[in-house]
Image: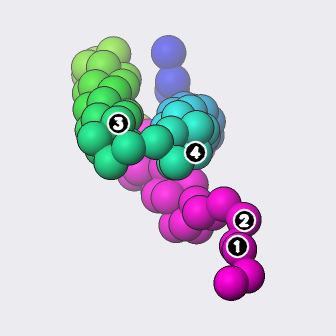
Amino acid sequence: MIHTVTGGMLCGAALGALSGWGARAALKKVLRAADAVFYAVFAVSFFCRLALLLAAVCLLRHEKYIIVIAFAVSFVLVQLAFEAFPLKHGPKINT
């Protein structure tokens, strides 16, 4: 599968970007919905990203540990980059 540390970092970053973008898009779509809906989508996206990380690490269990660690760290850091910038709350209304 992945045989180098650089390959592990690139694959982790790509998968992290995909999952981070998906979670952010889902949260942005329900931003103006009721709190219960927003928090439900937040919880589901959190557990989906966690399951994706665990599945990827399970698939990489036969690789060297440094490759698995590089994959996981780049996966998490790229996801955090998507969460670092707050979502916009919609247009401001002057009153």
Residue that label 1 marks: 92
Q: First in sequence, mark 3 or 4: give its number.
A: 4
Structural distance between the alpha carbons of marks 4 and 2: 14 Å
Residue positioned 72% across, 65% down in the render: 91
Q: Give x and y (percent) for residue 28.
A: 58, 45
Q: Is residue 1 above or below residue 68?
A: above
Q: Give x and y (percent) for residue 31.
A: 51, 48
Mark 2 vs 3: CB contact within 8 A: no
Residue positioned 28% across, 25% down in the render: 51
Crowdedness of circle 1 by 10 Å Cα count: few (<14), some, many (20+)? few
Classify mark 1: helix, strand or loop: loop
Structural distance between the alpha carbons of marks 1 and 2: 4 Å
Crowdedness of circle 4 by 10 Å Cα count: few (<14), some, many (20+)? some
Q: First in sequence, mark 4 or 1: give its number.
A: 4
Classify mark 3: helix, strand or loop: helix
Residue that label 2 marks: 91
Query: In front here: 92 or 67?
Result: 92
* Tag 4: amino acid: Lys
The magenta-colored residue range is: 70-95
Q: Give x and y (percent) for residue 40.
A: 29, 35
- Give the label on residue 37, or none: 3
Image quarter hosting the C terminus: bottom right
* Tag 3: amino acid: Val
Residue positioned 73% across, 82% down in the render: 94
Residue that label 4 marks: 28
Residue 59 covered by magenta stretch: no
